[in-house]
Image (cartoon, grey):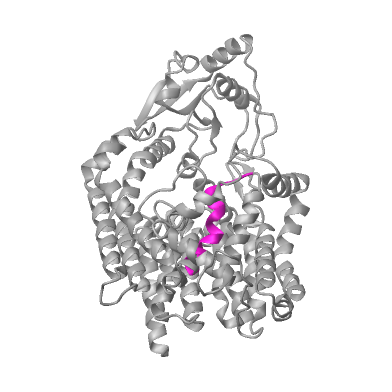
Amino acid sequence: MPWRTRRSILVLTLALGALLFLWQLGSTGLVDETPPLFAASARAMAETGDWLVPRVNGLPRYDKPPLVYWAMGLLYALPGQELWNPLGTWAARLPSAVATLAVMLALARTLLRWPQQSIRPGLTALTAALAFALSPLVLLWGRIAVSDALFSGCLSLGLLSCWCSYAAGGRRWWAAWIWLGLAVLTKGPVAVVLLGLTLLLFGWLQADLGRLWQRLRPLRGLGLTAALSVPWYALALWREGEPFWRSFFGYHNLERFTAVVNQHLQPWWFFAPVLLLASLPWSPLLLVGLAQGVTGPGPWRWRPTPVEVLPPPLSLQRFAACWLLAVLLFFTAAATKLPSYWLPATPAAGLLIALAAQRPRGRLWPLAAALSVLLSAVLALAFAAAPLWVPRIVTPEMPTLPRELLAGGRLWWAAACFGLAAVAAALLWWPFSPRPRDGGRALAALQAGMALFVLLVLLPCWQLGDRLRSLPVRQLAAAVRRDQRAAEPLAMVGMLKPSLLYYSRRVVIYEGAPATGLVNLADRLNRERRSGQVPAPAARAPSLLLVIDADTAAQPHWSGLDPELLGRAGIYRLWRLDRRRLERRAADLGQAGVRADWEDPRPERY
């Protein structure tokens, strides 16, 4: 393929990725509950100059290594934040968006360099990048301020570098291990396990483990990975000691794999539906691509046959199948399961989908093509029937959401996007069309409909959700900054929104809605000490500011406290509360048997 054509495809991939992940990236606020914790920690790094251990709300945050905080913090350190980053979201979300764009370009570049006998290598490269980018998981995590997209990006670039080095006879073997080191600095040792399991599966299925070992030089590579990542772990352990070891290694790594944490209990087959949902509406093509990757590019047969050993430059589909299976096997074995754990498999899924579309072989292929078109048509019908099911949506934080969704008319646009895409793809795949079974172009038609849905429907609905769900918290954070008195503590009870601490720039005491939360709050104001929060008796700090939602305020133990109402926004109220009344109510609850439990061990306190 001419160099100019390859460059045009990469430019087109970059332009589409920028529309999907950079367009309106900073136009909405941070989404509760986790992103504000990342953003506040990164901003604190930039403001305090302490770049070793992230800290948020006056406490150290040991949940993730520092790379994502460093990336965000460097952006927060840039001048003129009020002009280009007024909501804090450009700095917080840009690392996720850039990592996603980098994976799109890497997928396209890999297929342009190693076409895998595709009929149209340029179209295959573009559809692989879009099959990855248009995954519902990637569309979400590629635009929010957490570490998952950056981890998936670093790990994916490392795995693609592994395969490219294997295909190229061992050239640039070191690149994979540098990316692996960055992945370890983003989310921990799980990156080494996933890469190692992928290579073991691939070497075994390809019957070429010796050559794979020789070309990738894993002993030297792991030394390079360790040199890049271990120093931070050693410094953090030296400074923080046992709390860091117990929280990061014990809870966030070992315990998440061996036990259920945060009530994320799921059945063992949880990732099977996630695999299908994360690639809608072309999930059937993913299954065909996975079968082709395991058995070889020829027709799939019911009876087992010896697996074909592929030449290294033509083994990308098999490598992608092993990559996806490694993620599936590892996280299926883990006790704690979350949909975001599937994110590292989405680039492999993009490769398998695009390559399956370009190889219309076997008896299962026509069925997979027809099901992909049918799924797009089903989505169109579902959005067309929105007046029947949208009113059934119950959202306590956004009570007016169903009405505003229907009034906006965007769901009819969604039906049109998926419906037209299904019609176009069906015409291209129809056996009697001028180009029968034109899989690549039909997949591109489905992807065009999905991309239009993102731009015309999903992003405007995201802004609607921000206005209904997040804007009220930002408005009360501004009221806190305006009305808070010197040494007056700030608390939030009921619905716990970390965006309050981010936008108010104050330490916030968070407690739940039950009676225990009230008793805890009264006790913590007198006894808890953290950076930015000094305990004080009611005689010295007679009032506190309290953000409370309407449902919590209606509970008996929170009623009758005679607060001063300073502001209201959405379902939230800002109270100035006399601490003596709070302590009397806490004493009454204590006599009724309610005890404070805030000092009990909690691994994820903020």
**What span is in magenta?**
336-351
x, y percent for residue 339: 52, 49
x, y percent for residue 131: 43, 65
Corner quadrant of residue 130: bottom left
Q: Is residue 298 above or below residue 464?
A: below
The C terminus, quarter of image: top right
Q: Is residue 33 above or below residue 102?
A: above
Residue 348 seen by the camera: no
Q: Is residue 331 above or below residue 349?
A: above
Corner quadrant of residue 520: top right
Nearest to the observer: residue 139 or residue 207: 207
Residue found at x 53% / y 65%: 291
Nearest to the observer: residue 202 or residue 143: 202
Name the residue at the bottom extreme: 2
> Within the magenta stretch, is there residue 519?
no
x, y percent for residue 500: 47, 39
- Which secondary structure type mostly characterizes the magenta part of the structure? helix
Nearest to the observer: residue 493 or residue 356: 356
> Within the magenta stretch, is there residue 339?
yes
Residue found at x 57% / y 62%: 324
Residue found at x 43% / y 55%: 136
Q: Is residue 326 left or right of residue 452?
A: right
Residue found at x 21% / y 41%: 407
Corner quadrant of residue 511: top right
